[in-house]
Image (cartoon, grey):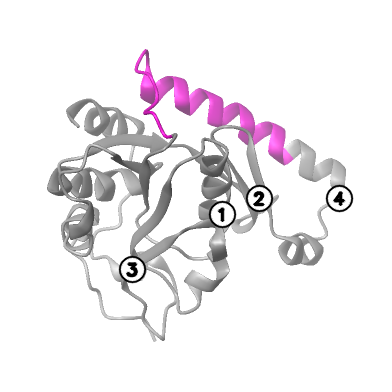
Amino acid sequence: MVMTTQFEDRAAAGRVLSNHLPAYAGRDDVVVLAMTRGGVPVAWEVARALVTELDLLVVRKLGVPGRPDLALGAIASGGARYIDPKALAASGVSPQQLEEIIATESRELARSETLYRGSREAARIEGRTVIVVDDGVATGASMCAALMALRGAKPAWVVVAVPVAPPGAQERIGTAADEFVCVLSPPDFCGVEHCYRDFGSVGDEQVRRLLAAS
C-alpha cells in the first residue's frame, strides 16, 4: 500500500524542514549544502528561512548496469567514494565493471559542477556548521558519499536534514553526521517519491537559477 502524500512539492517540504532547524537561524558560521539535484529546491527554502549561505554538494549514484534503480554506492565532490559491500556482492558486478561505472559517473560529476557553478567559488567549509539537505533518504548511499567528502573539508559540525527517511536511516548513516533531522519517518516507507504530490525532476537550469538567487 502506498503511503499518504505528505508534501505538496520540494519547496513546501523545505519550508516545513526549516521549522525543525531553529538553532541554526541567522548564524554566519552556518552553510546549507544542497544535494544535487533533488535537494536544491528543498535546501533553497531552508537557507532562505534560516538566512544562511547556500551551496551545492554534487553526488552521483553508482547504478547497476541495466538496473539503474539499484545503487551500488555513490561518489561525491572532492573525490569521495562510498560502495555498499552487500549491494556489490549481490549485484554480480565485477571490479572492472565497477571502475567503468565510477569513471562514467566521475565525468558526469565534473560536468555538473562546471555547469552549476560557472565561475562561482565553492563555499568555505572548514570550521563551520554544515547542514546537508536532500529531498529524502532511501538507501543512504548518496548521503554517505556526501558526508565522506565533507569530512575532508574539516567542518566543525555536520547536520543531515531531510523531509523524509525510512526508519533506521539515522543508524545507517551513522557517525558520519553529528546530528540527523528528519520530518517524517513512516513505518510503511516505500520510496521518497511517495511522500510528494509533485516529485517532478529537477533540471540543470533550475539548479543554476536557485543557486544564483541564493
Residue segment shown in magenta: 101-125
The image quadrant that residue 144 belongs to is bottom right
Q: CA distance from mark 4 to mark 1?
A: 22 Å
- Is residue 156 covered in magenta? no
Tell me if mark 4 has few (under 14), some (14-19) or many (20+) residues whose alpha carbon lies within 10 angstroms of its own: few
Q: Is residue 137 left or right of residue 200?
A: right
Q: Secondary structure at mark 2?
A: strand
Q: Is residue 42 left or right of residue 159?
A: left
- The residue carrying mark 3 is 182
The answer to whether residue 38 of the structure is visible from this angle is no
Mark 3 and mark 1 lie on one chain; the one further toward the N terminus is: 1
As drawn, 92 above or below 53: below
Predominant secondary structure, magenta span: helix
- The residue carrying mark 2 is 82
Q: Secondary structure at mark 3?
A: strand
Front label number (2 vs 4): 2
- Marks 2 & 3, CB-CB < 8 Å contact: no
Q: Residue at x 30, y 52 (%)?
A: 200
Q: Is residue 73 left or right of residue 76?
A: right
- Kind of residue sitting beneath label 4: Ser
- Kind of residue sitting beneath label 3: Cys
- Marks 2 & 1, CB-CB < 8 Å contact: yes
Mark 2 and mark 4 lie on one chain; the one further toward the N terminus is: 2
- The residue carrying mark 4 is 94
- The residue carrying mark 1 is 144
Q: CA distance from mark 2 to mark 4?
A: 16 Å
